[in-house]
């Protein structure tokens, strides 16, 4: 089962660097569910230089964002506001909720990712 978010996440992983890690300083775990109900997790380490992407989960995650595959793509593209998604129950955050706001930094820096 495929995930639309996979290409976005791979782009994030390739684009991570020391500067982004200095700016973001968060280890994100994304728990996504696709349209078929299949769940998959990725870790974007935007804290430990030079940063990396890995498939799976991490005990070191600063925050875990639980969201559907389609909504994740909309969040990153800017079509869906993170606060709106959270308030409408489309996205759940586990761990440091303030750190989740740093996702905006990755979205804003997406031209670099």
Image (tube, helix red, strand yellow):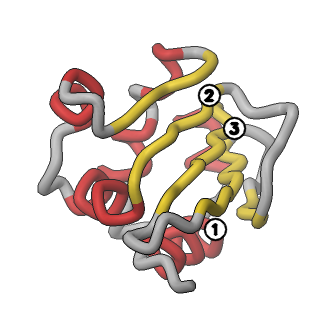
63 shown above or below 69: above
User: Which residue is painted at 58% across and 15% down in the image?
Assistant: 96
Quarter assignment of residue 48: top right
Task: Give the labeled residue for mark 1.
Answer: 13
Nearer to me, 9 or 65: 65
Q: Which mark is residue 63?
A: 2
Nearer to me, 96 or 50: 96
Q: Residue furthest right?
A: 59
Instruction: Please state the horizontal and vertical placement of residue 52, each as a whole percent of the image.
Output: 75, 60
Q: Residues within 10 Å of mark 2 (few under 14, many from 20)?
A: some
Instruction: Please state the horizontal and vertical placement of residue 79, each as a whole percent of the image.
Output: 12, 56
User: Which residue is painted at 22% across and 26% down in the image?
Assistant: 83
Q: CA distance from mark 1 to mark 2?
A: 17 Å
Q: CA distance from mark 3 to mark 2?
A: 7 Å
Question: Could you tell which of marks 1 and 2 lies nearer the N-terminus?
Answer: 1
30 shown above or below 101: below
Q: Residue furthest front?
A: 37
Which secondary structure, mark 3?
A: strand
- Which of labels 1 and 2 is toward the front? 2
Question: Could you tell which of marks 3 and 2 lies nearer the N-terminus?
Answer: 3
Task: Give the labeled residue for mark 3.
Answer: 27
Instruction: Please state the horizontal and vertical placement of residue 75, each as a whole percent of the image.
Output: 27, 51
Q: Is residue 67 left or right of residue 45?
A: left
Which secondary structure, mark 1?
A: helix
Which secondary structure, mark 2?
A: strand
Q: Is residue 86 left or right of residue 35?
A: left
Quarter assignment of residue 64: top right
Q: Do the numbered discs 1 and 2 sit on residues whose CB atoms are within 8 Å?
A: no
């Amino acid at each position: 089962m495929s995930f639309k978010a996979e290409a976005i996440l791979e782009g994030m992983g390739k684009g991570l660097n020391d500067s982004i890690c200095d700016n973001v300083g968060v280890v994100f775990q994304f728990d996504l569910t696709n349209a078929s109900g299949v769940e998959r997790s990725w870790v974007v380490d935007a804290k430990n230089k030079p940063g990396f992407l890995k498939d799976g989960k991490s005990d070191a995650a600063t925050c875990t964002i639980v969201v559907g595959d389609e909504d994740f793509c909309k969040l990153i593209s800017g079509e869906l506001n993170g606060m709106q998604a959270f308030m409408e129950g489309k996205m759940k955050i586990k761990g440091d909720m303030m750190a989740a706001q740093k996702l905006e930094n990755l979205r804003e820096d997406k031209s670099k990712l």
